[in-house]
Amino acid sequence: PAPVRPGISKMAESEAFYENEDNLKKLCDFLRGKEGPAVREAIEMDKRVYYLKGEKLVNFLVEPKKGTKWPSNLPKFKTRQEAIAVCKELCRLHFIHRSEKRGKGDLTISRNRDFDESGYFTWIYEGDKSFSNMMTTLLVVGFLCCTCFPIWPQFLKVFVWYMSVTLLIFIFFLITVRGAVFLCIWILGFECWVLPNLFDETLGFVESFKPFVSFEPTKEGQLIYRAGIAVAFVSFCYWAVTQPSEFDGFKQGQVDFIKDLYAGTLLSDMSQADKDNIDKPRMPSLDDLLKKLDSSDDEEEEELDEEEKVAKMLEDLVGDEDEDIDEDGEE
């Protein structure tokens, strides 16, 4: 920024600083980051957007929330007029635009483009797109690699198979443990979920793991259901203890199933077999020859059956003609 002449107030210094569009972008990067003001999600023109009220934006610029680390390369705002002037500049440069609420979580673009503390403003500025472009490139490259899976080396296929099986078993184990913990505590009159937001599609990746545990009392009127589930659970435990042979067979079946998963015996890799035998002459095996002979014998039998049917039809026709001739002679 240009040097400030003596006699110019601190307010004029900050205004001159934010007149530069690049400096405004730095301010927007800060406002859109984790240290920025809280925003809400909504749908505007069939697109998910983030918005906030003009008053909250001005309040944050003048008095940031407690614990906020203001960037050292950005001058702070001393008055509300100074903050409002910068917000108007954000609207003029289309970093934000004014919106109107049509319903809960539903916005539409307002015809009034001026900044007002009582209005709602939606962020247009998305910051540096380098990371987003890099992730998009990685996604396209990953998709192309997945489509070329049949020509992958065998060791990569085995690695992907082990990773997939391990992830599948881990997810199944996690779901089972979450359900068992919830069931045991729910019978006692409380609802306890481990990672309650794990499968919430509306949250981001990090937010899905918060909080780690939720614990609250159950709603009224569930005593009968809890008693019934408790009886069923105790009955299952009693069966597992008194019938060790059947339960042990069930456990052994699960262990064998997991071994077969890791061994890859449940699925056959025909593409790899074709790749390994691409240069070998394709000679029919003994089983193929026997099947071919059996099929040829069946075809011959079918042909003979058809010939016998045709011969029988001819005999019937000839017999009918002879009977007609005999009847004419007797008359």
Image (tube, rainbow, N blue to C red):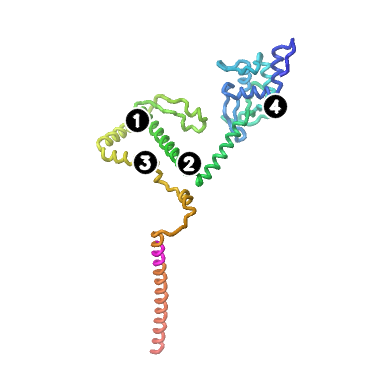
Q: Which residue extends farthest left?
A: 242
Q: CA separation, marks 2 and 1?
A: 49 Å
Q: Residues within 10 Å of mark 3 (few under 14, many from 20)?
A: few
Query: Left or right: where does residue 97 sit relative to residue 212?
Result: right
**Toward which corner of the image does residue 291 lie, by quadrant?**
bottom left
Q: Earlier in the sequence, mark 4 or mark 3?
A: 4
- Which label was assigned to residue 226? 1
Q: Amino acid at mark 4?
A: Leu
Instruction: Decide: is 205 above or below 9.
Output: below
**Toward which corner of the image does residue 106 lie, by quadrant?**
top right
- Which label was assigned to residue 156? 2
Bounds of the magenta span? 291-298
Q: CA separation, marks 4 and 3?
A: 62 Å
Q: Amino acid at mark 1?
A: Arg
Between marks 4 and 3 in the image, the one whose residue lies nearer the viewer: 3
Q: Earlier in the sequence, mark 2 or mark 4?
A: 4
Between marks 2 and 3 in the image, the one whose residue lies nearer the viewer: 2
Between marks 2 and 4 in the image, the one whose residue lies nearer the viewer: 2
Q: CA separation, marks 3 and 1?
A: 37 Å
Q: Earlier in the sequence, mark 2 or mark 1?
A: 2
Q: Residue at x 58, y 17 (%)?
A: 69
Between marks 2 and 1 in the image, the one whose residue lies nearer the viewer: 2
Q: Please name the residue that numbered disc 3 is placed on.
A: 259
Q: Residues within 10 Å of mark 1 (few under 14, many from 20)?
A: some
Q: Position of residue 278 (x, y in %)?
A: 49, 53
Instruction: Decide: is 292 above or below 277.
Output: below
Q: Amino acid at mark 3?
A: Lys
Q: Amino acid at mark 2?
A: Leu
- Which label was assigned to residue 215? none
Q: Please name the residue that numbered disc 4 is placed on.
A: 93
Secondary structure under tag 3 reads helix
